[in-house]
Amino acid sequence: MAKHEDISQALIREGGIADILNDYSPHFADNVAEILKDNKDKQIPPNIFHAVISSQFDADRLDYMQRDRLMTGVRSSYVDMEWLFANLEVGEIKVEQDGESLGTAQTLVLSPKAQHTAENYIFSLFHLYPNVYLHKTTRGFEMLFQALMRRLVCLVRAGKMGDTGLIEQNPLIEFIKEPDKQEHVLSLDDNVLWSSLPFLVQAKDKYVKKCALDLMIRRPLRAIDIRLKVEAALEQKKQGNDIEEGSQIVDRICKNIVEKIKVGQGEDSEHCILCDSYSRSVYKKALIDERSAHLNQILIRKNGSIRDLRDVSPAIHYAESYKICRAYVFRDDREQKYTKKVEDIIAEEVKNA
């Protein structure tokens, strides 16, 4: 499938953005596009601009966390951006890889006065996950959309496009047939999906029809919070001497439950139980063997040296990840049957823990 980095480069080099950038400076569009290039081949030396577009303190995060907070009515994730920017500077640090010095590199650094605001930023972004991005209803519709797309892909690849309810020229069908073509990726947007739903609900394939109808009438799947049920059951059994040990036990049980659910449904794309597991850490550790690791971290100038926020903030250092493990079932005549099936598996795994 076409990479999003390649898509972004094409838009910058060939779209209307290119004219604006090149008016500012000749070949400036190419220079900007190069920054977005996938750096996994290590041919492009990482620089400070990579920190601006892709890091734990990048411009995208700073923008969407404020936008999403306002759009969803979440008041607890406010961050004093003006104070952060007022205390933002360019610093120079030593870069090493596998114990070998690679010289120095410039990166973004916060002054000591901004440490608590930086901590607030980290936790504010983190709290948007349980409140917004990983909310059971939000994720339920994401799982529903994924199930619909998987089924469409299976049908088209099996030569059963006629069962989808869509014509061959539909952008979704064109993308499924040739996912590597950038023009097919660029043709996909919200309007394509919403305008396709009335045709998908008329599909010959019952699974496509069911998923499309639930999306169109905004009927959410029933969520079964596996992790919450396991935690409650273990608390009654008094298992786990501390938080870390208890979390590991819960992780293991949840993994076993999801595996049993998936095995019970086989390889068919018509899953009646949709499983969703996700873990979101508060702050990512620096990768020691990665030469651009410093560009991904939030750095603080502390006592004359530049240090990772995680190393100077106990709150960040010891914060636990937020994890979800849920099962979703369709709200139809088999809802009770599959809900009971999931709950029976949970009870069995907890009993054997």
Image: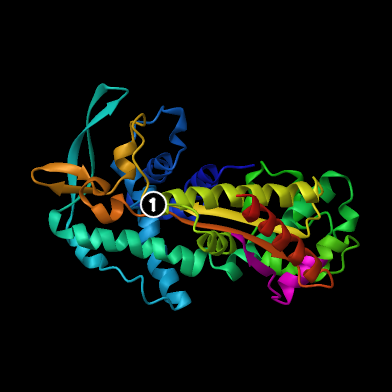
| 193 relative position to 250: left or right | right
The image quarter in which residue 74 lies = bottom left
Residue annotated with mark 1: 21
Judging depth in this view, the residue of 55 and 196 nearest the camera is 55
Q: Quadrant of residue 203?
A: bottom right
Quarter-wise, where is residue 117 in the image? Answer: bottom left
| Disc 1 packing (10 Å; few <14; some 14–19; many ≥20) | some
Whether residue 68 appears in this view of the structure is yes
Query: Percent position (x, y) of residue 187?
Result: 65, 56
Q: Considering depth in this image, is 209 or 185 the residue closer to the camera? A: 209
User: In this view of the protein, which residue sits in the foreground, 81 or 251?
Assistant: 251
Q: Residue at x 38, y 51 (%)?
A: 21
State the image coordinates of residue 321 (x, y, percent, origin top left).
43, 54
Residue 221 lies in the magenta stretch = yes
User: Residue 112 location, x and y as percent?
Assistant: 14, 54
Q: Is residue 47 visible?
A: no
Which residues, given as a range, are shown in magenta? 210-226
For residue 32, above or below residue 80? above
Extreme residue toward the left, this view: 304
Circle 1 SS class: helix
Query: Does residue 30 belong to the magenta stretch?
Result: no
Q: Which residue sits at x=46%, y=63%?
A: 129
- In the image, is 338 to the left or to the right of 328? right
Q: How is the image coloured?
A: rainbow
**Which amino acid is tagged 1?**
Leu
Residue extending farthest to the top is 100
Q: In the rendered view of the protein, which quadrant contains the N terminus? A: top right
Residue 304 in picture, x, y percent from top left: 8, 43
What residue is rendered at 66% in x and 51% in y? 258
Q: Is residue 99 above or below residue 90?
A: above
Q: Is residue 347 left or right of residue 292?
A: right
